[in-house]
Image (tube, rainbow, N blue to C red):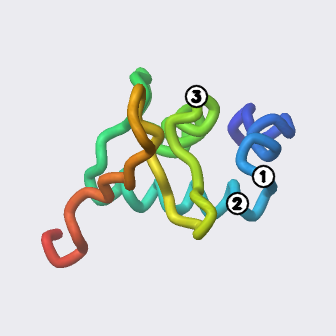
Amino acid sequence: MHEAFKEEDIVNKVGGRFKLSSLIQKRLVALNRGAPALVEMQTKDKLAIVVEEIMQDKIYLDTSGDLRVAAEGSEDMPTDDGPSLADL
């Protein structure tokens, strides 16, 4: 189990356990489809990468439940989900 899940900080950061689960699932799909990681880490553990992206406020769920990437110095932009399933 990842250490971040032992604390309530990550749950409170995203607004609850359901939202956290949804955000993690959506981001894992994006990473598995080829989207680049938004943090530098010395691991290939995609769950660890997603947790770090959340903790660094790199990703979040918008009000409609869609995954968003927080762009530095500009407006928030939709995430690049990588190639479509048809491309794989």
Query: Dot 3 lies on which element?
Result: loop
Q: Nearer the viewer, residue 59 or 3?
A: 59
Disc number placed over residue 15 in the picture, else none:
1
* Residue labelled with disc 2: 19
Q: Which three-letter amino acid code belongs to the residue tagged 3?
A: Gln
In the shown orientation, is residue 36 left or right of residue 29?
left
Q: Residue at x 73, y 34 (%)?
A: 4
Query: Dot 2 lies on which element?
Result: helix
Outermost residue on the bottom side: it is: 86
**Distance between mark 2 and mark 3 Cα atoms:** 17 Å
In the shown orientation, is residue 15 left or right of residue 57?
right
Q: Which three-letter amino acid code belongs to the residue tagged 2?
A: Lys
Query: Dot 1 lies on which element?
Result: loop
**Distance between mark 3 and mark 1 Cα atoms:** 15 Å
Disc number placed over residue 56 in the picture, else none:
3
Q: Which three-letter amino acid code belongs to the residue tagged 1?
A: Gly
Query: Mark 3 vs mark 1: which is more N-terminal?
Result: 1
Q: Position of residue 10 (x, y in %)?
A: 75, 39
- Local packing at callout 2 (Cα closer than 10 Å; few below 14, some 14-19, many 20+) is some
- In the rendered image, which quarter is residue 39 located in? top left
- Local packing at callout 3 (Cα closer than 10 Å; few below 14, some 14-19, many 20+) is few
Q: Residue at x 52, y 43 (%)?
A: 59
Are the two marked residues, 2 and 1, in contact with CB atoms closer than 8 angstroms? Answer: yes
In the shown orientation, is residue 32 left or right of residue 83?
right
